[in-house]
Amino acid sequence: MSGPPFRPRPGLRPLAWIYGIGARLVMASWDLGLRRPRRLPVPVISVGNLAAGGTGKTPLVLALCGLCRERGVSVGVLARGYGGRGRDGLNDEGRMLARRFPDLPQAQRPDRYEAGLRLLGEKKVDLLVLDDGFQHRRLHRDLDLVCVPASDPFSGGAMLPAGWLREPPEALGRADLCLRVVEAGEPEPEEEDPRLAELGVAQVLVRRAALDIERRPGGERLPLETLRGRRVRALAGIARPERFARALRECGAEILERRWFRDHSKIPRALLEETGRTCAEEGSWLLLTEKDEARLLGADPVPEVERYVFRQELRFPPAARSLLESRLDQLLGRGA
């Protein structure tokens, strides 16, 4: 997939109405019990969203895996593997997880139930995380976590392709917990969004924050302060690249150039090499997201261009972390 990032097209609202009718019919078939999900023999936590891309699913999966390991819980990850896989059999999100947790069991198949059975047949895990699973209702989940923008949980309220929504706003009513993600540069919103409260869904605020910079090749980790006053050229193939640019500016970087591609797109090697040469000549940095770096690492051969990877994470206030820990203990029978 190449070309510019997806942007909603308000002029296609008639198509969005048709899409919305179809989405509601699919929802009704599950809600009325006309279709039934299949259950795996271990608890499943689904991580998903309502909108198309860019709302913090992968950082939440990373955070959940870290939380499980801290608490001595063996965890695996199921995913469809959208966007193509490299020589290691993983897509960009899977490779990101593998870089943070090298021994993490993962299975990527369109049929997540079959993927789960295969993983459980090969590895002993206590719990499975279903990545991008909110719309994948064919697999039973014991906990449904949904990431939404903190300032606008309904992402404008319009369905694809006129807006961002994959399902109508009322679908959030089936979530167990909405994580309202505050992006870089956004003010702290109110603790409770009345629209989510009206749907009866629990909600917590979390913040997507810059973590560090990784120099490639080599893997040296640099503090965020090294970006202050630094001239950079940014390349990205993600859903909401403007958030990447905003986060760089929040860290004090001066953006000389930015080139955006569609989500899951590989940055063309010729462009990468050309931008790398330009940066070397002028003393600037070539900046990539962690997802884009993961795609490069799936290439053969891996590019040797000097580049810097901007890493981010989700940060949980004490109340949000405590709530997640409590839900996790309940799933594993550790609570009272």
Image: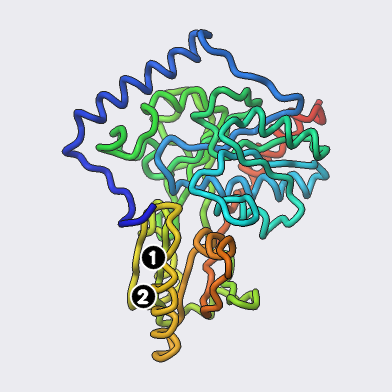
User: Residue at left 44%, top 80%?
Assistant: 276
State the mark number for residue 245: 1
Residue 329 occupies which quadrant of the picture?
Answer: top right
Query: Viewer-proximal residue, 40 or 67?
Result: 40
Query: What kind of residue is marked 1?
Result: Ala
User: Residue at left 31%, top 56%?
Assistant: 4
- The correct choice, above or below, for 167 with respect to 78 in the image is above
User: Residue at left 37%, top 41%?
Assistant: 152
Quarter holding the C terminus?
top right
Badge 2 element: strand
The x, y position of residue 94, in whole percent, is: 61, 50
Label 2 environment density (alpha carbons within 10 Å; few <14, some 14–19, many ≥20): some
Q: Are marks 1 and 2 in contact (CB under 8 Å)?
A: yes
Query: What kind of residue is marked 2?
Result: Ile
The x, y position of residue 244, in whole percent, is: 42, 62
User: Residue at left 38%, top 16%?
Assistant: 25
Q: CA distance from mark 1 to mark 2?
A: 8 Å
Residue 269 occupies which quadrant of the picture?
Answer: bottom left
Residue 128 occupies which quadrant of the picture?
Answer: top right
Between discs 1 and 2, the one toward the N terminus: 1
Query: Viewer-proximal residue, 69 or 209?
Result: 69
The x, y position of residue 309, in whole percent, is: 53, 69
- The correct choice, above or below, for 221 with respect to 36 in the image is below
Badge 1 element: helix
Query: Viewer-proximal residue, 108 or 98?
Result: 108
State the mark number for residue 255: 2
State the mark number for residue 64: none
